[in-house]
Image (cartoon, rainbow, N blue to C red):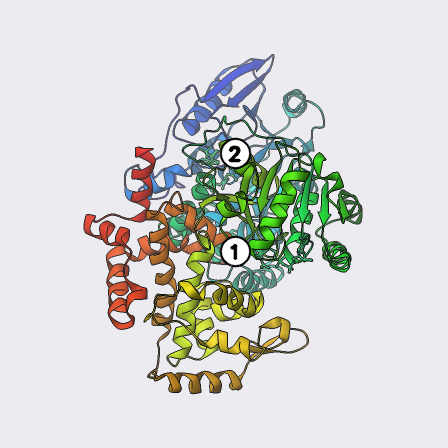
């Protein structure tokens, strides 16, 4: 077993409950039965090994079919096992020996794929002699999304089947391919349109007497070094842009390159080394946290899974502006008919025309077909009255931000809609309970805070009002999935979770400029940290006037004697609203390309001098610490006050709504990774230097005193629930 990486444990097989073997005359059927997704958890590889041995021992059997029980083939290695391996709680285990064992089987093994063959699942399939699949199946090597690379020969067998370019793409980008595409690529030998098992058994019988081809012995797709070199260069280049800062995609490319230069055995050794380096990296730990976090946020302790939901078959959106138009598209994309209402006829026309343009762009970029778009557009009906509102199950209000207007609209909706209809507000700052008070059905009122552009951004903050019913919460959580969004339940505080944290984050960015840092330097430091955009450029994109108007409305709540940033308000007073006025923190050309604006820096320097703010050189580290720890400190307060259920919920909000780098796991996970004592100490320093705004959150202090992390806080909360 030269392929077993050092220290990894090889396994022999024992049949068990996770793998069954049955017979269809001369074909053995090996069924993997490890719900929900047939992950290769301990016991599964042993079971497959034993089943292969058993069918080879049985003289009456000519071939085997390996199939997944339930809804899928095999979704990969058991991701829960990785943290046990890196912490030393479980021995390291490699699937490589099992895959060689299958490939060396003298009798052909046919892998029958439905659902997904992902990661170790596809690696298992490639070790079979043949692969058949249902047309709706998907296959892929998504490991990079977990910060690792295929670790069971995937980077070595895949290029031998699909060629180097496609293997690089699949391993470095992690996107799945459909069974139909896989069949065209030579990864799937036959698509089975009818019953998969019946078709697979017939296929196995057909190939039983042929010599069983071994993927690892194939080389015709590997091409020459001269042909491959530009593929690797282009892939590395693309990775640097599309997956900026991530290490695993580069490691995946290196591993595929090894397949083209080394023997299969040496290639596997290179892959194993790269896999291990990735597995033990902070990036992988963070991305695995994100994988489970995205699933965890769907779990609401007091809203059990079996809470009844209200079927949402028809909806209405009120307000056809930036958000309303995008939200209407989100529903239409999910096949749900939408009424789109606006008081202003021209605004409605503009809204519908923007929707049309957005769809036309999607067709141009190849995201949607024209037929799909025509169908979606037919689902959106512009209206100017509430006449048809008694037929909808849910309304999302997206009119101008203002309490008086929202209350008027909700009172109208209360009268226009049927009793069980959900009334949701897309408000980004206003009190949901106060809005609910304008209706006779507070239990049906909830916040659904979409992010801009609504048809693109994945995050949906679902804001629980004091009286929002469990049924309404469960419906919105479930609906978010149907809409392709990631729904996170938050409490009703000013700014909810995301924007409440974004305030201190952007406040610090402004302070830094007021203290002497250049605008681009601040943004650049955060981009280098991994954020999609810097905080000041983000302000320009969203419109500086939005925050300015809100600040003016809430100015009476500012505590006297506490420093407030002034630069952005003054820029707004000068009409510099950001991209929309082609001037904000930056200057923009007609294509909205940004360049530094010396006028801004001169103005800020003057304003700072007038305010007596000493100017100094500020390091990139301080910029990142000030901005990111402002998020962490406010996040800890939100958590303690119960406006977010778990630290991981805050992480998922930041990754999906605010461009925080996924490979850092979100602000709270990042703080755990840095070490809470270190973060706390830095916050205490800022508190001393900058005063009250930096008072450390009590929860953070308590966790540090107890030697705990936010992740441990989440576990304790879950155990107590
Ligand atoms: N290991 C452990 N648990 C897994 C898992 C895995 N590979 N895949 C899914 N699960 C769990 C989920 O956490 C979830 O648990 P929960 O119900 O307790 O929250 C449950 O299975 C159902 O998963 P989903 O909610 O995601 O179900 P969907 O039907 O929406 O999606 C899926 C199914 C497309 C298979 C999706 O779960 C998925 O993408 N899974 C991960 C696939 C993956 O990344 N595979 C590679 C693993 S690494 C590897 O194989 C390394 C190898 O090269 C050695
Ligand atoms: P917008 O100004 O683009 O559009 C508002 C629309 O509401 C206008 O078309 C207006 O004619 C219409 N309207 C006003 N009164 C109405 C009434 N009584 N009945 C029907 N329509 C009416 O505003 P935008 O940006 O779309 O914001 C809408 C809501 O979404 C606000 O509550 C805002 O806080 C929130 N939000 C905005 C985000 C953004 O980035 N723009 C992000 C997340 C939430």
Q: 16 or 610: which is nearer to us? A: 610
- The residue that mark 2 highlights is 474
User: Dividing the image into four equal quarters, which quarter contains ligand 2?
Assistant: bottom right
User: Where does residue 286 sit, x and y in percent of width and height?
Assistant: 40, 50
Residue at 34% in and 69% down: 560
Q: Secondary structure at mark 2?
A: helix
User: Quick one: 239 or 643, which is closer to the camera?
Assistant: 643
Q: Earlier in the sequence, mark 1 or mark 2?
A: 1
- Secondary structure beneath disc 1? helix
Does residue 446 appear to the left or right of 491 in the view shown?
Answer: right
Q: Residue at x 36, y 57 (%)?
A: 634
Q: Is residue 625 above or below residue 632?
A: below
User: Which numbered disc, 1 or 2, marks the residue closer to the eye?
Assistant: 2
Tell me what residue is drawn at x 43 percent, y 84 percent: 607
Q: Within the image, what quadrant is residue 87 found in?
A: top left
Query: In the image, is residue 440 above or below residue 651?
Result: above
Residue 410 in the image: state x and y as whole percent.
Answer: 61, 45
Residue at mark 1? 257
Tell me the residue at 45%/60% (across/down).
502
């Amino acid at each position: 077993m030269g392929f077993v990486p050092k220290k990894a444990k090889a396994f022999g097989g024992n049949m068990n409950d996770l793998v069954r073997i049955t017979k269809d005359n001369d074909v053995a059927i090996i069924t993997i039965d490890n719900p929900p997704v047939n992950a290769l958890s301990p016991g599964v590889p042993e079971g497959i090994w034993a089943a292969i041995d058993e069918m080879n021992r049985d003289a009456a059997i000519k071939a085997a079919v390996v199939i997944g029980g339930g809804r899928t083939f095999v979704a990969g290695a058991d991701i829960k096992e990785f943290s046990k391996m890196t912490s030393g709680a479980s021995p390291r285990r490699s699937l490589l020996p099992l895959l060689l064992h299958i490939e060396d089987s003298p009798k052909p093994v046919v892998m029958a794929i439905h659902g997904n063959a992902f990661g170790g699942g596809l690696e298992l399939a490639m070790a079979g002699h043949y692969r058949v699949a249902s047309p709706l199946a998907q296959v892929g090597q998504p490991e990079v999304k977990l910060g690792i690379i295929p670790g069971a020969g995937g980077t070595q067998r895949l290029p031998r089947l699909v060629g180097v370019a496609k293997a690089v793409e699949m391993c470095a980008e992690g996107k799945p391919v459909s069974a139909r595409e896989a069949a065209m690529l030579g990864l799937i030998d036959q698509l089975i349109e009818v019953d998969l098992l019946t078709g697979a058994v017939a296929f196995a019988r057909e190939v039983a007497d042929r010599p069983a081809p071994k993927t690892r012995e194939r080389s015709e797709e590997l091409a020459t070094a001269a042909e491959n070199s530009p593929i690797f260069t282009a892939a590395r280049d693309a990775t640097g842009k599309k997956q900026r800062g991530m290490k695993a995609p580069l490691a995946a490319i290196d591993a595929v390159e090894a397949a083209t230069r080394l023997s299969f055995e040496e290639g596997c050794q290179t892959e194993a080394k790269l896999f291990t380096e990735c597995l033990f990296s902070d990036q992988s730990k963070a991305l695995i946290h994100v994988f489970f976090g995205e699933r965890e946020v769907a779990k609401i302790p007091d809203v059990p899974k079996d809470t009844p939901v209200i079927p949402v078959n028809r909806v209405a959106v009120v307000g056809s502006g930036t958000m309303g138009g995008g939200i209407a598209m989100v529903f239409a994309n999910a096949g749900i008919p939408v009424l789109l209402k606006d008081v202003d006829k021209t605004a409605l026309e503009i809204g519908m025309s923007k929707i049309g343009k957005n769809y036309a762009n999607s067709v141009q970029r190849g995201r949607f077909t024209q037929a799909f778009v025509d169908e979606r557009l037919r689902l959106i009906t512009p209206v100017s009255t509430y006449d048809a509102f008694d037929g909808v199950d849910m309304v999302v209000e997206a009119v101008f931000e203002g309490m008086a207007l929202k209350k008027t609209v909700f009172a109208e909706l209360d009268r226009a809609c049927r009793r069980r209809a959900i009334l949701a507000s897309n408000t980004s700052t206003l009190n949901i309970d106060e809005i609910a008070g304008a209706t006779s059905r507070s239990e049906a009122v909830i916040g659904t805070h979409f992010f801009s552009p609504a048809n693109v951004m994945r995050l949906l903050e679902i804001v629980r009002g004091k009286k929002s019913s469990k049924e309404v919460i469960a419906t919105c959580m479930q609906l978010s999935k149907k809409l392709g969004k990631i729904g996170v339940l938050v409490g009703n505080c000013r700014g909810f979770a995301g924007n409440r944290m974004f305030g201190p984050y952007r406040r610090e960015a402004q302070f830094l400029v007021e203290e002497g840092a250049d605008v681009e330097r601040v943004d650049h430091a955060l981009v280098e940290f991994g954020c999609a955009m810097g905080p000041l450029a983000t302000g320009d994109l969203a419109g500086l006037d939005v925050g300015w108007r809100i600040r003016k409305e809430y100015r009476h709540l500012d505590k006297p004697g506490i420093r407030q940033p002034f630069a952005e308000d003054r820029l707004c007073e000068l009409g510099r609203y950001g991209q929309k006025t082609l001037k904000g923190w930056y200057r923009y050309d007609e294509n909205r390309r940004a360049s530094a604006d010396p006028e801004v820096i001169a103005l800020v320097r003057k304003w700072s001098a007038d305010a007596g703010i000493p100017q100094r050189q500020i390091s990139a580290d301080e910029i990142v610490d000030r901005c990111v720890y402002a998020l962490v400190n406010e996040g800890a307060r939100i958590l303690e006050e119960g406006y977010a259920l778990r630290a991981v919920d805050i992480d998922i909000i930041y990754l999906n709504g605010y461009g925080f780098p996924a490979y850092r796991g979100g602000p709270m996970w990042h703080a755990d990774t840095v070490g809470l004592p270190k973060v706390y100490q830095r916050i205490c320093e800022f508190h001393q230097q900058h005063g009250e705004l930096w008072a450390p959150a009590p929860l953070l202090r308590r966790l540090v005193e107890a030697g705990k992390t936010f992740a441990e806080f989440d576990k304790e909360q879950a155990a107590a629930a």
